[in-house]
Amino acid sequence: MSLGKVRIFPLGDSALTVEFGNVISTALNKKAIALANIFEQARFPGFIESVPAYASTTVFYDLIAVRRNFPDFPTAFEAVKDIASKAVSELADDTEETSRTIEIPMHFDDASALDLTFVAKMSRLSPDEVVEIFMCRIYRVFMIGFLPGFSYMGEVDERIVVLRKESPRLLVPKGSVGIAGKQTGIYSLASPGGWQIIGRTALEMFTPGQKTPSLLRAGDLVRFVKADHQLLLADAQACA
Amino acid sequence: MSLLLQKPGILTTVQDLGRNGYRRFGVNPGGAMDRAAARLINILLGNDDNEALLEMHFPAAELLFEAKATFAVGGGDFSPKLDSDAIENWRPMAAKKGSTLRFGGKASGNRAYLAVAGGFRLENWLGSSGTNLAAQIGGIDGRKLDAGDRLGFRKKTGKNKSVDSRRISTSILPPYSRFPTVRIIAGPEVQSLDKRGRASLVNHDFSILNNSNRMGFRLSGEPISLSKPIEMISSAVGFGTIQLLPDGQMIVLMADHQTTGGYPRVAHVISHDLPLLAQLGAGDKVAFHLIEASEAEELALEFERELSFFRIGCKFQAQSWAS
């Protein structure tokens, strides 16, 4: 793709961000993930890691190692910027992606769905309708951040969009599934948080002992299913 | 052959230079707040720069050497005493079996480091022994240390009683102060500040608030405003990123910061000066001085060259401590 609308800037003296835009969009997110993967696969000397976000990729590097390995560039930033620019120009305009689809079994009982009644009230729907609408969509994991293994997913159906809580909960239970605007996410660990909690999963979203500790990764597709009756067909029938 | 925590101190954790490669899964690198202090005392002891050590806050831990060992303390000066003798920061010291290390009072700084020659025997998680308090893993069971915790030594050291007169030359130590001028480079949203905000950033002092911690330092000072509101979506942030909060105050992200953030990034503290900031506590002040990214790189390179020279001498010396 052309570098036209892409912004490349330093994020401190040991990282650089490639920004494709400033909106939440699947097309831009695909580019961010594809670019992060290029860096991970063709690791340049001094490369530490790449982090895809909604519409940007940040590359962290060891500036000392980059300076040693790229003496022709005046700075480490210029050297990494050159590598990043070339990688961006090699990205296809319409980025292909092979996504995994992961099923997340959910509980919607009162103890799990802490804000379901509130969300229903705000949406002028019944709690059951909120749940059905929520489960009808397949969500894209745009990025992992905030907590180890916390997934930022979208987009939530307009009918059940609610803003985050005015004052965050001091402790959101582990596994809680929340809505914040058009985003949905799973609290991989117990944590303070302000998203409206509509259910909970018992699935471990973050397993420290594993080499890939997070169950989800950017680019995954997520389908929520009811833990008590995992019949996909029955759910699908409700999604008219 | 271990170090026993008789008293845990208010927040004592195992740290190293951080856990890289897992930010994309939301796992932050963490690591020592004052990387310079951690590296310097490790190098002094002949250790790898990245060797795990203890990071202590004040009131600090009380530690019993259950075997003799060579150790060093650095970073903040918490008035260390080995049994009845006051000892100095930044010097290799020999502890006898049964010696107790205590910290009598905070003379300077807010984070002190304790390393032993040869390092501690610790489990490794995703390439690091450092404690990740959010994920509750690394260090010892992913938590701050408690009374009764034991850290095993990997090597027998402490042969020479009077270790030697080597100490870290003051020229290589960070110029710690309770009111440092810390150099920053511009962040991607600095152009979105209004004219007054851009001036305030570098012309005013900022105080560190008491709700500051290993995740971030909250600053209080002249409110800073944007020339017009900007829409932000979350993206990666780093150790030293200075974010502007909606109330016009700033937060500097520190070692345990979240991997991503959605507030305007007005600036970044340069790597070279992060240790100066890392030693500040509530009530201390900081001033910012804006430099070019290329200068930040030169400062980092210069420090690295100094460390290289220092490392050569220390490696040789450390061989005499093995027993």
Image: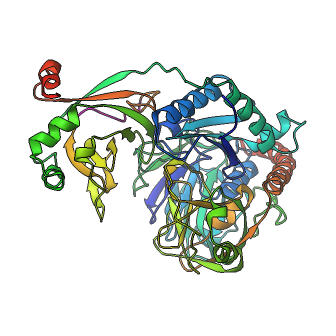
Q: Let me know if residue A206 is in the magenta part.
A: yes
Q: Nearer the viewer, residue A78 or A67?
A: A78
Q: Quadrant of the N terminus of chain A?
A: top right
Q: Position of residue A15 (x, y in %)?
A: 67, 45
State the count of labels: 0
Q: Position of residue A201 (x, y in %)?
A: 22, 36
Above or below residue A101? Residue A50 is below
Q: Nearer the viewer, residue A99 or B40?
A: A99
Above or below residue B55? Residue A73 is above
Quadrant hosting residue A230:
top left
Residue at the (23%, 49%) spot, across then down: A197
Q: Let me know if residue A193 is in the magenta part.
A: no
Above or below residue B24? Residue B83 is below
Residue at the (52%, 73%) spot, across then down: B248
- Per the picture, the main secondary structure of the magenta-coloured stretch is loop
Q: Is B72 left or right of B212, judged from the image as shown?
A: right
Magenta stretch?
A: A201-209
Farthest residue toward the right? A72
Quadrant hosting residue B101:
bottom right
Q: Nearer the viewer, residue A49 or A37?
A: A37
Q: Is A121 left or right of A83, judged from the image as shown?
A: left
Q: Is residue A30 in view?
A: yes
Q: Is residue B124 in view?
A: no
Q: How is the image coloured?
A: rainbow
Quadrant hosting residue B72:
bottom right
Q: Nearer the viewer, residue B64 or B205?
A: B205
Q: Is B89 left or right of B30, judged from the image as shown?
A: right
Above or below residue A57? Residue B108 is below
Q: Position of residue A176 (x, y in %)?
A: 25, 44
Q: Is B10 left or right of B75, judged from the image as shown?
A: left
Q: Quadrant of the C terminus of chain A?
A: top left
